[in-house]
Image (tube, rainbow, N blue to C red):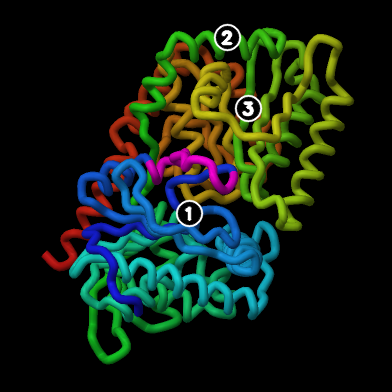
Amino acid sequence: MNTRSAEADLVVVSNRLPVDRASEGEEWRRSPGGLVAALEPVLQTTGGAWVGWPGQPDLEVERFTFDGIDLVPVALSAEDVERFYEGFSNDTIWPLYHDVISPPTYHREWWDAYVRVNQRFAEAAANVAADGARVWVHDYQLQLVPRMLRELRPDLVIGYFHHIPFPAYGIYSQLPWRNQVLDGLLGADVIGFQRVADASNFTRAVRRRFGFDTKAGTVRVADPGGAVRTVIAKAYPISIDAAAYDEIARRPEVQERAREIRAELGDPDTVLFGVDRLDYTKGITHRLKAYGELLAEHRVDVEKVTLVQVASPSRERVVAYMQLRDEIELTVGRINGDFDTVGHSAIRYLHHSYPREEMVALYLAADVMLVTALRDGMNLVAKEYVASRVDGRGALVLSEFTGAADELGQAICVNPHDIEGLKDAIMTAIEMPADEQRKRMRALRRRVREHDVDRWSRGFLHDLGSVRS
């Protein structure tokens, strides 16, 4: 282990730093995203550090400070990115943990890279943490870090939060390195999941593989050397900065932009909206199929209803994602070819990302939000839509396979695999009376406002702080 070079009382460890830049030599910019918004104020007040990859292969960056946060870059080579990130993280763990919607690929050299890179992150965190510091590790790319960190620094209090689903044992057990990953996670003192079901899947896997006693959100862990610890393993549903979305949605220029968007679409009676990373877990093809059938059955009229689908680029070097993009674009082209008129387009498909203000304007312009994920840890888009609807209108069609479905009970919940049921849910949303929209949206907004990202981070850090108190 390196000689310690700083004394941070709170260290966040995630795959990416909370900043990015387009190319070498440019200024660093704060990354968008709820995790950054939640943890930045805490790190600023505690003098904390954030350990992560700067986002470009073979980029060696010295440690630096940004907005009062000590940033500790971990360099990854092009081979690391290919094997650790694109390979094991996103072509093995991601599909496996999302119920094998796409077949996972198992390569031993990918696993070796995963171990090697996790060790590098653990050493970087150990190097900057003060005695007895809290270290909060994030997500599936770094599942081995908690155990590695405990071996390097047994004085630390270690938390881990799993942002994606944790699969049922029958699926998880397919992983060739299942014991090593569980042992890596059990190095933490507090392990957080999005849903109660995810925490239960994890503790069930621990019982099956190791025989440890699990009860009431805890695991009795026998560490190497004979020491026994009690590990908290339970759900901490993540959320958004609801107040920020509310404030943006009230700006006159954003509301004007929402009106412009509807005019650009030909002023349809109903705007359906979907926004997702281009990912096979998001159910985009199911959504398009349902909408195409509604058009074919004349249940909706292209002159009156338009679907806007934003699919932001994602993992474009992974073969499964290239194939998905081709499939979606062919489907959009076929539906538009069959149903477009001179003045109206059935689907407006946009394959790029937008700044937050434009996204809020799109949320305001949309009468119906379609969230049809086949499997999702949470799905923050659903919460962003609700937080943006300051007019109290709008309807949310929400997949029951998202973590958000556990919280947003006034949404129209659907099984996206059931295309007939999905079509009926879309029609229910389109035809929903204004009074019912307001009633449902009022309850949804209250939930999102009261359970925001600040409450999420405070709850997790409170439990982490109580470990040795």
- Amino acid of disc 2: Arg
Tell me if I can see residue 99 in this picture: no
Report the residue at 55% width, 14% height from top: 258
Q: Nearer the viewer, residue 351 or 426?
A: 351
Distance from the alpha carbon under mark 1 to that under mark 3: 37 Å
Question: Magenta segment range?
Answer: 23-36
Distance from the alpha carbon under mark 3 to that under mark 2: 23 Å
Residue 97 appears at what percent x and percent y? 55, 62
How many circles with numbers are drawn on the protein? 3
Q: Which of marks 1 and 2 is nearer the N terminus?
A: 1
Tell me if residue 369 is in the magenta stretch: no
- Is residue 291 positioned above or below 341 on the image? below
Q: Which of marks 1 and 3 is nearer the N terminus?
A: 1
Tell me if I can see residue 126 in this picture: yes
Q: Can you identify the residue that label 1 sits on?
A: 16
- Amino acid of disc 1: Arg
